[in-house]
Amino acid sequence: METPYPKPISPTQTRIGWIGIGVMGAAMASHILSAGYSLTVYARTPSKASSLTSQGAHLADSPQQLACQSDIVFTMVGNPQDVKQVVLGTNGILSTLNPGAVIVDHTSSSPSLAREIYTSAREKGCWSIDAPVSGGDIGAREGKLAIFAGGERSVVEWLKPLFDLMGRVTYMGQAGCGQSCKIGNQIMVGGNLLGLSEGLVFAEKAGLDLRKFMGAIRGGAAGSMAMELFGGRMIDRDFKPGGFVEYMVKDLGLGVDVVKEDEDERVVVLPGAALCKQLFSSMVANGDGKLGTQGLITAVERINGN
Amino acid sequence: METPYPKPISPTQTRIGWIGIGVMGAAMASHILSAGYSLTVYARTPSKASSLTSQGAHLADSPQQLACQSDIVFTMVGNPQDVKQVVLGTNGILSTLNPGAVIVDHTSSSPSLAREIYTSAREKGCWSIDAPVSGGDIGAREGKLAIFAGGERSVVEWLKPLFDLMGRVTYMGQAGCGQSCKIGNQIMVGGNLLGLSEGLVFAEKAGLDLRKFMGAIRGGAAGSMAMELFGGRMIDRDFKPGGFVEYMVKDLGLGVDVVKEDEDERVVVLPGAALCKQLFSSMVANGDGKLGTQGLITAVERINGN
């Protein structure tokens, strides 16, 4: 299959656009700037772009203006609705994107929307890659994100020099497969965090020394990256985000609330992920949506009357 | 506090009794025999003891006969009811155990029963240690179990040469704390296995390559020892036990079905562990109680109509 351009990606030849400069998006875009690429940024709140413009980024007035002068447009926005609007909306990227250009959506979004964008992009002679990430703000800052890519394999390979600036990319399959990988990832993260939270709440009630408890069990099947990353923070009541609780509600929702949007979409029954989503939702309802996901232990404590 | 004996444990001076020679118990007892200790075994089905008697173990006719000629009695039986009967029953160990002797219960059992046994043992001038293990049949065979010990610290230290033959012991606190640690461990294992199972079922339905999926996510918060130990076996439909599903039902039940047996006992609300227990119970109901715990994925598949 043809690649977007016969020429390889390079700082002198490839013009990059970036939409969405929250904590993670800004850190990821910064790596591209640091590598010498020309970067244009669109932000609904232009003042938020100051750290990037001081690094040499240009500001665009609108997504369309950004799109028509970019060879590759990255998006890292909040949720599927935002993605849909900024890419497919009347004033969206695709309305002005040049044939051969590529959209890379880093937002954690829905597989069916990724497929819809892919189809619309191809109709305009453009390409799209769904490329959600895992690793949180620290992974974004350190350029150590896991990137799950769906779409044309040759396009993902062509993009690799840029992905390499942000982390490690894995090609997962056709359009939507990157998003499915991220959702599957979050389902597992949820299970690990729930087991960790409930195990610690139980151990606390049983009067165990929690660090000794984790030390005794971490080498066996109870051990997890969640324990290594978040066990100590749960004990220390350090709930600073990493990944926001409210994003976990969204991500798990993409797994358990799948609507039959097209013929391919199949509902999957996941009682554990549904429970995790409920507990994370209870935190949002209690005003804790901006805590880090390790705050899940507070939801388990709350139902125990703590 | 006084230790059971002023003299250290040694093959020439310490007589060992062992009750319960299932897959794990037999492997653990075998390590003690191999280290040169004199070992007496009681088995309801004497033929099951043949591998140990061929290694030099003696056979006792009853738990009482075994107890009166042992300095230390290990128990590794099925469930709390068995422990209660073999230790506290009219014909149980404590009826003939000599003052100063020690009971070490390796069964995964209830913290309150461990405390009851401790109190009864002390009334007779004996000692008891609750010491459930984690690591399955492979850990037992290779002498690499994690051992969680509750009771008198000095007694646990005194026993260390024997625990070292079986794995790595951690002193968790007073009587019952070893059992609480094991239950907390199982709560986390359950969460990890549930997240892993649901993530794989979701990924399968989404059409992902499951090994590529695990490879893409294992370095992040989705990673777990459960994934490393069991992910491949789930994909390969290898459900041979390690740990039995039916034991997981028991262990999780000790966490979520806690009855107010004494003033210390507090009910802990653990919706994730309760869900895990329900799913494992559905497997027992379907005749799959003797599968390994990684078979949990079949319960998730079943509710999805596979």
Image: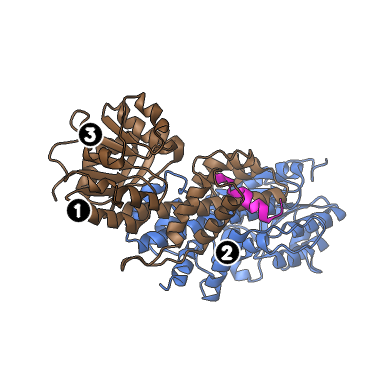
Chain colours: A brown, B blue
Badges 3 and 1, same chain: yes
**Spot occupied by residue B31 in the image (x, y as percentages of width and height):** 58, 51
Is residue B274 shown above or below B166? Answer: below
**Can you tell which mark lies on residue B275?**
2
Chain of the residue on which disc 3 is drawn: A
Q: Amino acid at mark 3?
A: Arg
For the residues marked 2 and 1, what is the alpha-carbon distance in whole angstroms?
44 Å
Residue identifier under label 1: A122
Q: Residues at badges 3 and 1 in contact (C-beta under 8 Å)?
A: no
Q: Amino acid at mark 1?
A: Arg
The residue segment tinted magenta is A294-306
Label 1: element kind? helix
Q: Nearer the viewer, mark 3 or mark 2?
A: 3
**Can you tell which mark lies on residue A15?**
3
**Spot occupied by residue B82 in the image (x, y as percentages of width and height):** 70, 67
Mark 1 neighbour density, 10 Å: few (under 14) some (14–19) many (20 or more): some
